[in-house]
Amino acid sequence: MAAIFITRKQWPLCVIINIFTQTSPFLTNPDITTPDRFQEIMKSYINAGLEDQIMFGSDNWDIVKSIASVSALDFLTDEQRDKIFYKNAERFFVKSATER
């Protein structure tokens, strides 16, 4: 399975089955992206139908703040939050491993 990770906050969104995005540290870091802008970006991902293609990105900065940024998204359901935090990555990496 091929995947392209969209991590640039200014990229337009498109729904393609094998494209995944992550909650990059650039998005979850309130010193770079304001919480309001992060919420707007994540809402646009969800509204575009990408809830099964968003993976939590834990690299390059304070993991506690990253978790808090995603947890603070009050429009997400518990299921959507679980998908972002681990279910989508689990599905992606298990499927990738079985295709080798």
Image: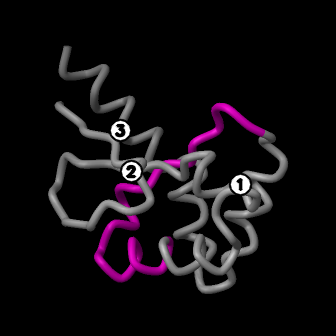
The image position of residue 2, as x and y in percent, is 17, 32
Q: CA distance from mark 2 to mark 1?
A: 16 Å
Q: Earlier in the sequence, mark 3 or mark 1?
A: 1
The image position of residue 85, as x and y in percent, is 60, 52
Residue positioned 52% across, 80% down in the render: 40
Q: Secondary structure at mark 3?
A: helix
Q: Earlier in the sequence, mark 2 or mark 1?
A: 2
Q: What colouring style does the render use?
A: one colour
Q: Which residue is mark 3?
A: 92
Residue positioned 33% across, 41% down in the render: 5
Q: Amino acid at mark 3?
A: Phe
Q: Which quadrant is home to the N terminus?
A: top left
Q: Which residue is mark 1?
A: 29
Outermost residue, right side? 64
Contact flag, marks 3 and 1 (Cβ < 8 Å) = no
The answer to whether 73 is drawn above or below residue 70 in the figure is: below
Q: Which quadrant is home to the C terminus?
A: top left
Residue positioned 74% across, 61% down in the render: 30
Q: Amino acid at mark 2?
A: Thr
* Left or right of residue 95: residue 58: right
Q: Which numbered disc covers residue 21?
A: 2
Rendering quarter of residue 29: bottom right
The image position of residue 21, as x and y in percent, is 39, 51
